[in-house]
Amino acid sequence: MAGTGITLRELDARPVADLNGVGPARQKTLSAVGVASILDLLGFYPRRYLDRSREATVAELAPGVEGMVLVRIDRTSARRTRNGRSLVEVRCSDDTGRLRLTFFNQPWREKQLREGMQAVVFGKADEYRGALQMTSPVVDLVGDRTGRIVAVYPQSETAGLHSWDVDALVGEALRRTMKVRGLSDPVPAEVRERYRLADRSEAYRSIHRPEGMHEMLEARRRLVFDELLRIQVALVRRKVELERTSTGIVHAAAGGDGDPVAAFLDRLPFALTGAQRRVVDEIAADMARPAPMHRLLQGDVGSGKTVVAVAALLTAVRGGHQGALMAPTEVLAEQHHQGVAELLAGMTVDDPATLLGHRPLKVDLLTNRTTAAERRRIAAELVAGGVDVLIGTHALIQEGVEFGSLGAVVIDEQHRFGVEQRAALRDRNRDGTVPDVLVMTATPIPRTAAMTVYGDLDVSILDELPPGRTPIGTTWHVDEDDVWPVVRAEVAEGRQAYVVCPLIDESDALDVRSAEATFAELSDGALAGLRVGLLHGRVGRAEKEETMRLFRSGTLDVLVATTVIEVGVDVPNATVMVVLDAARFGIAQLHQLRGRVGRGAHASRCLLVGEAPTPDAEERLRALVRTTDGFELAEVDLDLRGEGTIMGERQKGRNDLRLASLRRDGEWVEAARTEALAIVGDGTGLADHPELADEVDLFLGADESDYLLKD
Ligand code: ADP
Ligand code: MG
């Protein structure tokens, strides 16, 4: 048990300079790759293993097939080709044959690959003048390591750090760590037994020096579990803490006569989908609990989140509280206001202070554009409880906006809001009660990923679209000329179209220029004679509004735009979405853009235009053509881009998921979540697990764990 072995905290306190042969120069090299302590070093895992007992020999390489061989460098020479390119040729061999490597435009290879070195070479072999060769293979220098399994470490050419240097240091660190005390193990024994996890000391040894590949996999399993457990413990601890320290509002379950929730659902011109019904119930049950709700609603574009959101807001209104809906942009806030006001038109709320005992339900809009006078009126009515539902942008959480009793907050498109803004919203009530919070996102991510990225939230999923939707047919056209006839034909039928312009880069200014150029070109060319409008981030407010109004009313046929239309814009008569240079957009973004059409009775199309410059880009476009299922697309995205897609940038430091992959290790995420809930949620928190608590702090200290709550 804890107490005898060395803790990771202790290893963290020991600098690598404690190891033999690590002087100031080497220390600097190591710190360039993020290794400062012994803990960092032990967590600097091999990126590849070479199993000598199974490696291919040169004789076994076949032309046209990828292969990996361990070879000795025999001779290296450099020259220039006739057209001036640098060419390094390397002759190498093993006991079974010879292999030639060629590298174009990598002159440094001449110095890197010296006679007598051993290297692992990975690439596709081909035959050149009767001899085997590989062009620009992946090369790992491994020194003259013996042993059956050779660990290949990330190396840094620029810093002069080689795999064998790391290997030697890791060897010493392991020897010194294991010799005296071994590592202490903070994971409860019964948890280790349940999942048949290797002992921690053993795991660290075997990930670096496995006797066989099976042993390495066992080690990996254990270390993956540890990484995920730490994250889940941090998240669950945060969630439990939040619930413990805040007083929520117990919203009454379904009311009797005049229950606004029931009245609202009754009035809808359609029946809820099964998923909507389930989620509405989940939210109602959550809101009836004394702890504040903190829930994520994931639902694909068009899955009907608005109705669910309004039901949540009305659940608050039912008990005499207020509801707020916050959107990321003014356009969206205004659109929501319009839509929600329509949905709630003619409804009343109980008000004993009035003659009739009830008054009209009041929905207001607050954005940065709200006039000062209107703002004063709203502020006064908010405090007095005269406004039932307030819709707006960030303006909702500005200083001076105070509610009489804010009961529920819905945040639309969560990815545009940061943690602090969420926190600010929870801080609106004078009496210190915390409103229930529902965060909505139309960017689905796989369940296990959600457990991590939104680990402090409960998750509800709308996984069913309302019936009767005609699926959006998506096609990919390399040639732009193919798509304009489609646009013209739809317009001739009375429909409308969006054209999204190439995304230049992060620069707003360039995007604007590209949109303007595309607009000019199309208006005079392929779309001449149609009524074309332009919308981008730099268009003035009044003009933007006017353009949207003209498009909504059908006075414009085509809207040329940047991604400003990505989120939420709702014009049912628009049936064509053209995305130029589509390969530049990510899967989620394309899926969002596509969601702007297919909102009415008419069949819609999405036309993705342009070449795919990389295999990944091609796969993205093919995925969009293949499916309109946002969750399936999210899986593809996670596959192609890895964790970075959803975890954001900040986790690149030491707190990275180093071995664990949210995708491949999905079942371990679930296991870690279950165990974290059992360990933290048992009422005593982490009091019984001081060493685990300390380790979580070490890796995910209070200020560090914010990154988990992605913004
Ligand atoms: P989301 O915000 O999830 O993208 P919305 O809430 O905007 O989706 O709903 C999309 C459209 O579907 C709206 O026009 C809405 O009125 C309609 N809708 C929502 N729920 C249903 C349902 N159960 N049956 C039919 N239509 C629905
Ligand atoms: Mg919506």
Image: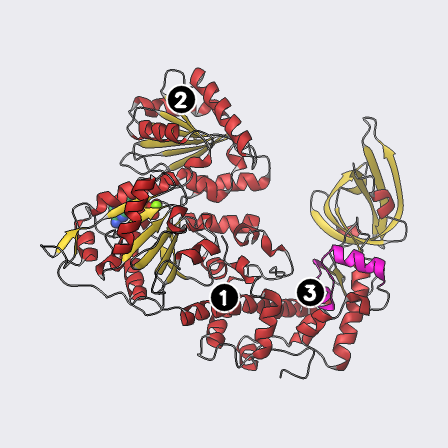
Q: Which residue is mark 3?
A: 43
Mark-to-mark CA distance, 3 and 2 = 57 Å
Query: Foreground: 550 or 47?
Result: 550
Label 1 C-beta lies within 8 Å of the nearest ligand 1 atom: no
SS for callout 3: loop
Query: Callout 1: few (<14), some (14-19), or many (20+) C-alpha neighbours within 10 Å?
Result: many
Residue denoted by label 1 = 235
Whether residue 618 is visible: yes
Q: Amino acid at mark 1?
A: Leu
Say if 663 sits above or below 605 in the image.
below
Query: Which numbered disc flags the more N-terminal residue, 2 or 1?
Result: 1
**Marks 3, 2: nearer the viewer:** 3
Of 110 and 339, nearer the camera is: 339
Say which amino acid is labelled 3: Gly
Apparent side of residue 163 relative to residue 215 in the rendered image (left or right): right
Q: Would you say 669 lies left or right of 197 here?
A: left
**What residue do we see at 73% from left, 56% from top?**
33
Q: Residues within 10 Å of mark 3 (few under 14, many from 20)?
A: some
Is label 2 in a helix, a strand or a loop?
helix
Say if mark 3 contacts mark 2, CB within 8 Å. no
